[in-house]
Image: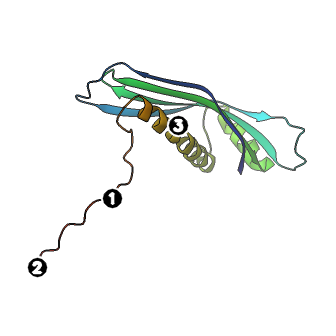
Amino acid sequence: MRVVGFNFNKMYAERSSSSYEKLSVKTNIDISEIKGVKQDLFKTEEDFIGVKFSFNLEYDPNIAKIELTGDIVFSMDSKTAEEVLKQWKTKNIPEDFRIFLYNFILKKSNVKAFQFEEELNLPLHIPLPSVRKEEPKKKE
């Protein structure tokens, strides 16, 4: 399984308040569509699957909102593609594909969200690694 195409279609960020009292950040990923994609560009035995997604961050209580929507195109073997499309008819996603899909969306969307958070002076929705001073060891 490979990602052969990705793009954001909508990027929205709004800050409504500067008070961070009782701040909580909720993250939501929604998959709105999974469908087969016909293509004539690549000469391959693999099938192509298109996915429409949205990634939302809600800074509560009514502090800020970040919304990203986009499309991803995956290439995969015919058997896997058939199973993904079959399960999607009931709005289910096979576990292996779901994990790969969500990790890819998180990787791309978190980076873009960090940019908006920096520009809007919002606290980061997930902590970044940091260097700390080492505490002196106590002698026994």
Of 22 and 102, the residue lying toward us: 22
Residue 10 relative to residue 5: left or right: left
Mark drawn on residue 112: 3
Location of mark 1 (residue) = 131
For the residues bearing labels 2 and 3, Cβ distance under 8 angstroms: no
Of 63 and 50, the residue lying toward us: 63
Location of mark 2 (residue) = 139
* Residue drawn at point x = 26 percent, y = 24 percent: 19
As measured in the structure, the alpha-carbon distance from the residue carrying label 1 to the one carrying label 3 is 23 Å
Question: As displayed, is residue 66 above or below residue 85?
Answer: above
Of 129 and 33, the residue lying toward us: 129
List x then y, in percent, for residue 130: 35, 55
* Residue drawn at point x = 28 percent, y = 59 percent: 132
The residue carrying pointer 3 sits among few (fewer than 14), some (14 to 19) or many (20 or more) residues within 10 Å by Cα, namely some
As measured in the structure, the alpha-carbon distance from the residue carrying label 2 to the one carrying label 3 is 46 Å
For the residues bearing labels 1 and 3, Cβ distance under 8 angstroms: no
Of 138 and 126, the residue lying toward us: 138
* Residue drawn at point x = 87 percent, y = 50 percent: 45
Res. 90 image quadrant? top right
List x then y, in percent, for residue 81: 75, 44
List x then y, in percent, for residue 131: 33, 59
As measured in the structure, the alpha-carbon distance from the residue carrying label 1 to the one carrying label 2 is 24 Å
Check disc 1 and give the amino acid type. Answer: Val
Question: As displayed, is residue 52 above or below residue 3?
Answer: above
